[in-house]
Amino acid sequence: MIRRKPPRVVTWPILLIGVLLLGPVIALAFGMASLGGDWSRATHRPTGLAPSPASHREAIVQVYAARTFGWRGAFAVHTWIAAKPAGAERYTRYEVIGWYARGGGSALSVSDVRAPDAEWYGAKPSVIRDLRGADAEPVIAKLPAAAASYPYASTYSAWPGPNSNTFVAHVAREIPGLRLALPAHAVGKDYLSPGQVFARSPSGAGYQLSLNGLLGVIVGGEEGFELNVLGLVAGVDFSRPAVKVPGFGDLPGR
């Protein structure tokens, strides 16, 4: 009996996906994400990354990323924006939280209750964008309208989107002055409206092609080159430089 080899048109995509999955598998192996744990007992402690409003009176905008809870953290981060106008006593957090959309509610959250730099269910965040003073002020002025214009507030899908990273990418497109390039493992950042396949990249410094966030490419001054296959993003950033790895983001980090 002669066994036929699978056609290359099938073999290469399978091999590519296998290679892209190595990053998340390694992230799990090294404990960067957990297969267990109780979300109701996870911590949301401030981490000291946000400057104190009492001693930093200037306007501040920070964008944070922290691994999502459970095994999904091997693949993705949750991102949000924290902003404080000049002289303000508190930060306002702008983010999308999936379970808020249950029962027909809105997933969009604009609140000053939670600490701007709080852990995300036990995961310590990192700052991926930091603007101060004159650079932050025009961004803060546009944040409320940009957040309110998010078209998927009543819809949430962890994969491929729309999700929390889709929201932050939307805000970044609405406010080019934010100059935000989201990390490679911000799954959902490449999600575009059904039927839309071409758009500016979130940073505003490039362009992207995307098929519902499942397959696409970005080329831009801030993002460099990114290839998205089923939400797994790999690429190269020549300006920093950095290599983009699924499950790890940009190496070295920003």
Image: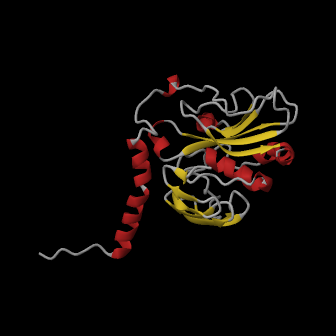
Residue located 56% across and 65% down the image: 216
User: Between 225 and 97, which is closer to the camera in this rendering?
Assistant: 225
Residue 77 image-quadrant placement: top right
Q: Position of residue 109 (x, y in %)?
A: 70, 36
Q: Residue furthest top?
A: 41
Q: Is residue 99 above or below residue 161?
A: above
Q: How many numbered circles are shown?
A: 0
Residue at image location 81% in from the left, 28% down from the top: 55
- Residue 142 lies, with reference to residue 195, above or below; the image says above
Q: Quadrant of residue 124?
A: top right
Which part of the image, by quadrant, shows the N terminus? bottom left
- Viewed as shown, does residue 87 lie left or right of 15? right
Name the colour scheme: secondary structure
Residue occupying the point 51% across, 60% down: 234
Of residues 151 and 43, the one nearer the viewer is 43
- Residue 217 position within the rendered picture, expressed as x and y whole percent measured from the top left: 58, 66
Relative to 137, is 7 on the left or the right? left
Residue 35, x across and y down, in percent: 40, 36
Q: Image quarter for residue 11?
A: bottom left
Residue 197: tell me if it is visible: no
